Amino acid sequence: MECYIGIDLGSTTTKAVVMDEDYNVMGQGITNSRSNYDIAAGVAKHEALIDTRFMLFRNAMKNVTALGDKYEAFMDELERNFRLEQYLEQLIDLDETCTKASENTRYSEWGSDLSDALSGVFKRVTTEAPELFAPGAQRKSDFFRDIAGSQYSTISEEVAKQAETPFDVLLNIYDRSIIEVENRIYTETTNQNLMRALDRTLVNLPDLAPVASEVRTEVEKVLGIDLEETYVIGTGYGRARLPFSKDHIRSEILCHGLGAHIMYNDTRTVLDIGGQDTKAIQVDKDGIVESFQMNDRCAAGCGRYLGYIADEMNVGLHELGPIAMKSTRKVRINSTCTVFAGAELRDRLSLGENRSDILAGLHRAIILRAMSILSRSGGVHDQFTFTGGVANNEAAVTALRELIKENYGDVTINIDPDSIYTGALGGATFARRAVEGIPTEAVA
Amino acid sequence: MSVKEQASTVAEKEDSMWKQKEMINENYELLSTANERGQKVASTFVPGNINELLMCFDFARNFPETNALQNAMRKKSGGMIMEAEKIGHSEDVCTYVKADLGMMMKGNKGPTGLPMPDPDLLMLSYTGCFTFMKWFELVREQYPKCETAMLHVPYQADGNITKNMRDYVVKQLKEDIIPTMERVSGVKFDIDRLREYMIQSQKAEDDLVYVLQSAKNKPSPIDAYFGGVYYIGPIFTAFRGTTAATDYYATLRKEIEARVAAGLGPITPEGVMKEEKYRIVVEGPPNWTHFREFWKMFYDEGAVVVASTYTKVGGVYDNGFRHDPQNPLESLADYCLGCYTNLNLPARTDMLEKYVEDYQADGLLINSIKSCNSFSAGQLLMLREIEQRTGKPAAFIETDLVDPRYFSPANVKNRLESYFQMISQKRDRAA
């Protein structure tokens, strides 16, 4: 199968989208690895290709009529089991890497107690793994570093209490090893993991026994399909680091403009708030960029601002929006500087202001910055599409809706749940067009 | 290509460049010994400079803005700016001013390392930049004995020069500026000497206009911004009216004529530009601290600047104005009144529109200067207007003149590449 791939190397995450020759989105992949752009691009692409494989499974399984109403349950089980297999594979790697790291002379004073402690930790982390991927299980993140890190840290704290090994030594070993593990791409073993996931699925869903062989044949057939990387386009801040020629690189402005147009054909204004950039883009009816503005020299009002605030408040990034939504009273935060906003936050808290109200004010402050960039780019025109990581934050969206209405009246506001992939989607579209011989103009 | 090889390419191809370098170095040498030789020194600014008149009184001419940018190109301005900030100048103050004051505080050594002289006259031609006035007020504090002369040039608020405006400037020249210069220098004013200088100015101006307008060719033989700032060097500063400048422009013109005939593109620091992919009009001064790096972002992408407004800040000649030996004082007045900095927003917009059309440009780029309040105001409005009038894409970047802290290469490059790709996207569709 021909695959047209767009890769968006952002400052926080790297995203990839796979498109087929008919411009259908087949798969999406994301990684938070930022230690190395080449690796990040490789991981995101690999994930998007796995996702593509699952799309092919889904299509193939629809042909297995005997599956009937068990189709959804089967696919859900298969995907979770695959994630579990992937997780287990990386755990083994992490275990080996940690063990090797523990052999360093700097830890020699802990002797065999250390290796016992480590193997104890990994034994428990591995035993508890299936629970993390059980139906309905809530994971704070889908990234290996986050899941494994949180498990390792909780368990090793307990182990350290019992064993003769300090907790900080165990953590130190983990910190040295995780980057190494995170920087490996497991392309070779994907199919084995899929088959193992299938086995697990068939065990967990005994009802499927009658159709097991038919399902297995379909899965094997899909695994036999070669996912050919026909054309790859890179975009985003790290694009120059991609091992591609210049023809395979597009600016993120063009990619976001086109991506938003592909998602919503009537888009005229795009706002993208990412980790360190806020971009306001005006596009024409074909998704061609008319003008754009970005934040200069200062990243206040971008995603990292929220990350910083989350750290200051000691809550998860994804918890910020929901807390802010509980606000009942408007608190005005006027700081446009990320660091000052932290100071203002502490000041307000000490004055006894409500956490939700302050957070709502901070979200509004971010959007106010974006409003200024929007007006510099030529204002907001119908339809308006909001993309980037911050578009997933409910409180930011609420503030944006209010301010758009106040300043520009009734405008259709589009927010796609997959908006984080907008740039990569634009890239994939450019990749498809490049092969079709349409340099840049829109088709959709 | 090694740096040495590059230098030799430039040397072979551009005699004018070496000529200019010599002229600048000689002027710094002249300035460094002026006090001890008893030659009077005048400091003055580029826009609206009345260089020929200063020459009539044998003044050595010192241009503080040029010193600041020369220091920036030699990576010296950052420390100077921080020095000026120590005595209380805020982050938002014009960085030319801070670099100049910082240079004085750090021992007053000029860009070439030679000492700068004490000025005998601060000659302020007020042509639209309020900061110039404040700048000289600060310099005057350092040199209490130094005289200040101010030529007040009315702003072209309505977009044209009236007889009243011209008379007003001439009256100041006659009644205030010339008598002050006579007093400070001890030299009697001779209008015929002024006429002689203006004959030289005219010739140089004709050649300069040819050079700048050569960019109408495809490919353009010059870069009218990054190359352009070199071409305007002599005529915007101490040399307009000298035979050295006239010779420089005659040489330069010949070089450019040869390039046009050979169908060559501009010379960049990495050799002759191979393919002209984008023709851009630029508004706003360049960044001086990262000049080469900034330029590279253009030529690496095949972008040539075919016209710029910055190359008009020290005189707008492409609309036909020339210094006139027959009416020397009136033409000095017209020169000052017509400087780019003295034009209102509609006039600047008209000029940009004309450039985009006449030079068959792909679009307009504005490099807005963070610390230049008077010049940066209104630029977004101009950008929108040009987009509407020409239908060509425009883009906006922000850097600074001589403060290295305000040049963010990744951001600037990102916006430039986006802009060039946006042009190519639009062009593909049109085709």
Image: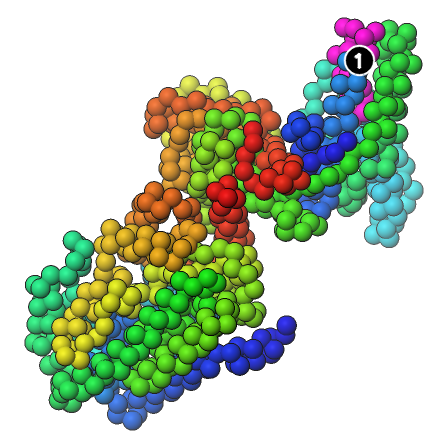
Question: Depth check: B237 or B423 in front?
Answer: B423
Residue A179 percent coordinates (x, y)? 75, 44
**Relative height, residue B91 to residue A320 (above, below):** below
Q: Is residue A421 magenta?
A: no
Mark 1 falls on what kind of element? loop
In the image, residue A268 lies at what x, y percent?
44, 31
Q: Dot 1 corresponds to which residue? A: A63
Type of residue at label 1? Answer: Asn
Q: Is residue B29 visible?
A: yes
Q: Residue at x 80, y 13 (%)?
A: A63
The residues colored magenta run A63-83
Whether residue A318 sits left or right of residue B38 in the image: it is right
Give me the residue at 84% from left, 42% from top: A98
At x 24% / y 51%, what residue is drawn?
B346
For residue A68: magenta? yes
Mark 1 burial class by Cα count in 10 Å: few <14, some 14-19, many 20+: few
Q: Quadrant of residue A147?
A: top right
Where the N terminus of chain B falls, by quadrant? bottom right
Pointer 1 chain: A
For the residue pair A272 and A164, the one nearer the viewer reads as A272
User: Can I make out residue B411 in this image?
Assistant: no
